Image (cartoon, coloured by chain):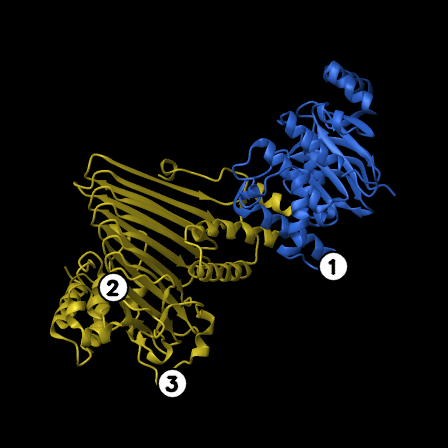
Chain colours: A yellow, B blue
Amino acid sequence: MTVASSQLGTYVAEFPKFSADTPSWLRELREDAFAQFCRVGFPTIHDEDWRFTSLAALARIPFRLARRRSAGLTISDLAPWRMENAAARVVFIDGHFAPELSEWTSLSAGIDANNLHHEIVSHGDNVAAHLGRYLDTKRDPFCALNTAFAEDGAYIRVHRGAAVRQPIHLLFVSTPQDAPGMTHPRNLILVDEEAQASIVEDYVSTGEGAPVLSNAATELIAGPNSTVEHILIEREHLATYNFSTLRIEQGRNAHVHSHSFLLGGALVRNNVHPRLAGEGGECLINGLYLGGGQRHLDNYMLVEHASPRCASRQFYNGILDDRAHGVFHGRIVVHKDAQKTDAKQTNRNLLLSDDAQIDTKPQLEIHADDVRCTHGATIGQIEEGALFYLRSRGLSEPEARQLLLQAFAGECLDRMISGSTRAYAAAAVTQSLSRFLHSTGRNIATSNGDWARHWGELG
Amino acid sequence: MSLLEIRGLHAAVNGQEILKGVDLTVNWGEVHSIMGPNGSGKSTLAQVLARRESYQVTAGEVVFNGKDLLAMKPEEAACEGLFMAFQYPVEIPGIGNAHFLRSALNAMRRFRGQDEMDAIDFLPLFREKLKLLEMDEKLMSRSLNEGFSGGEKKRNEILQMAILEPKLAILDETDSGLDIDAMRIVAQGISAMRDPQRAIVLVTHYQRLLNHVVPDFVHVLVDGRIVRSGGQELALELESKGYGWIEAEARRHALASA
């Protein structure tokens, strides 16, 4: 296979910048991953996994590793993203750990939260046992790229039987860059047997500058009987290419909830890949993507049922306006031994303009014979009847629209457990929804027609 | 000055003319009933008055409380004090009943330059009206009309009316599909709204509701026109004889005048 060397130029130039204290096992992992990336380069639309998402523009931009800024931000600069009641806050500025902005002193016993690099240097064996073991660098070049450049990110470990109800807030801040910059945050979350944790990965920008490639990867290992809630909020500026992969490895009877809120960025690819590896596991994969302008929001789900009697639920709602393009690609793979699998997938979309587009594609690969798998998608517009009903009670047209969109988005929020995390996500959604409505500021397409169309009609 | 003055109203839906010259005057404090066979234009009249944009007014004028109703958007008409109870209330998942009602009330209060009501001030009013309509408060924490029975939806419409206190209430077939108990409760809710400072227009196919809420005037709408007006006795006549004779009479009239 040949890869245009022009595509790889800056990555080749940037790659040798390892920290001096990188252990040899990690050097090897990173070198292998980089070699893999160089072999395949960026995927094209001929690749089935990337059929609806062109990376041609991205591949032409010469991204350099974002430098550590000498004049850093202060706590007050981060006030807009302050999460009340967070059990800990781990902050990264342009991919670099910012200890002066992080707090984890109030964490209870049995819970570690730190930056990954620190953990690699101090307890390398523990990290080596997990890092890179779950992520598929062969299938996804962005995972390979992330692994190649995996310098730092968050490390969280919840020890056996420990529970942290309040969320741990991981805040990834991108600051305006003079030249195209890239970050590759790498997170490792270990939730041991019978432990409980709530993790928020929050990607934000302090202002717009040159294009940014934000390519994050998280490996989340949920031990037997553990309960984990993971929230991704993407709200970087509109010159951001945001790629994120959440790879979940679930043990026996582990319950994991993944909630994604894609509210920002120009081109966003959200990969969620749980593997239900132990019997009786349950996984909820819930998400909302909200886009106007020419934004491109691609959700790629791969739910792997590898053990019997596991249940998975995928619910993704999309709201698309202007010329925005949404993608929902939902793969469910049921392995031969995963009998009594119960998998469900639902993707609902609201298109607010004639030029907005959604590609929604289920892909079921079932190798067991006693399973229940269902999937469905709807594509609709704001119903004229509902709008009139609200207006006939005195709500202005923009208020009525906002209420209807909030209700549609609210379906995703309602799937979260109520509490401070949900309140935080709800505030982020409400904020971008109102900004979204004001920026479009024109008549949104309405229809008298039926809300729903089914797979068959989508062709 | 009358509260509502409709003169020569013509309206079309999808290019088809449904209302063909409606004249109607409603004064403060009155209860009118508009009856008519299916397809006569009763619901169209209600929707036009509530300012549904997919219904095009092709001729005529409507003065509501001294203002040009046809120049108003639906929300403006609502804020000016016009309320229509829907024949088919819309189910809207994700919008809580109680929250929606308070938002609607506050939209009107803002329009009138009054302070908005917070949840704590709203609650006593809300509970009082719920009691009037014998509705379970639990229903109100659910989404708007979602999973409500037909009777619950209609009661919810009357509940909204009771809270929003309109000047003119147009009830579009609120009585259809109600069992005896729901009919009694709905009728009770409507009767409680009778007030010299308000008028009520009951759009209905049947006479049943009018046993509970006796109207001051009954009008019969046939083929987009009011062909006859009278009192309660007209409703009783329609009940016993059906609409056939009045439709035939209207046809003869139309032929004679042609």
Q: Quadrant of the C terminus of chain A?
A: top left
Q: CA distance from mark 3 to mark 1?
A: 50 Å
Few, some or many C-alpha atoms within 10 Å of disc 1 (few <14, some 14-19, many ≥20)? few
Q: In the picture provided, is B108 more to the left or to the right than B252?
A: left
On the image, the x and y values in percent for residue B208 come to 71, 23
Q: Which residue is rendered at x = 70% and y = 42% of the image?
A: B162
On the image, the x and y values in percent for residue A260 come to 37, 57
The disc at residue A452 is: none
On the image, the x and y values in percent for residue B242 come to 72, 16
Q: In the picture provided, is A348 more to the left or to the right than B21?
A: left
User: Which chain contains the residue that carries disc 1?
Assistant: B
Q: Is residue A3 above or below residue A68?
A: above
Comparing labels 1 and 2, the label whose residue is closer to the camera: 2
Whether discs 3 and 1 lie on one chain: the answer is no
At label 3, the amino acid type is: Ala
Q: Which residue is rendered at x = 72% and y = 47% of the image?
A: B77
At label 1, the amino acid type is: Gly
Secondary structure at numbered mark 2: loop
Comparing labels 3 and 1, the label whose residue is closer to the camera: 1
In front: B144, or A195?
A195
Residue located beneath label 2 in the image = A159
Q: Is residue A28 above or below residue A141?
A: below
Residue located beneath label 1 in the image = B113
Whether discs 2 and 3 lie on one chain: the answer is yes
**Among the 4 quarters of the image, the one containing residue B12:** top right
Residue located beneath label 3 in the image = A71
At label 2, the amino acid type is: His
- Mark 2 vs mark 3: which is more N-terminal? 3
Q: Residue furthest right?
A: B1
Q: In the picture provided, is A160 more to the left or to the right than B217?
A: left
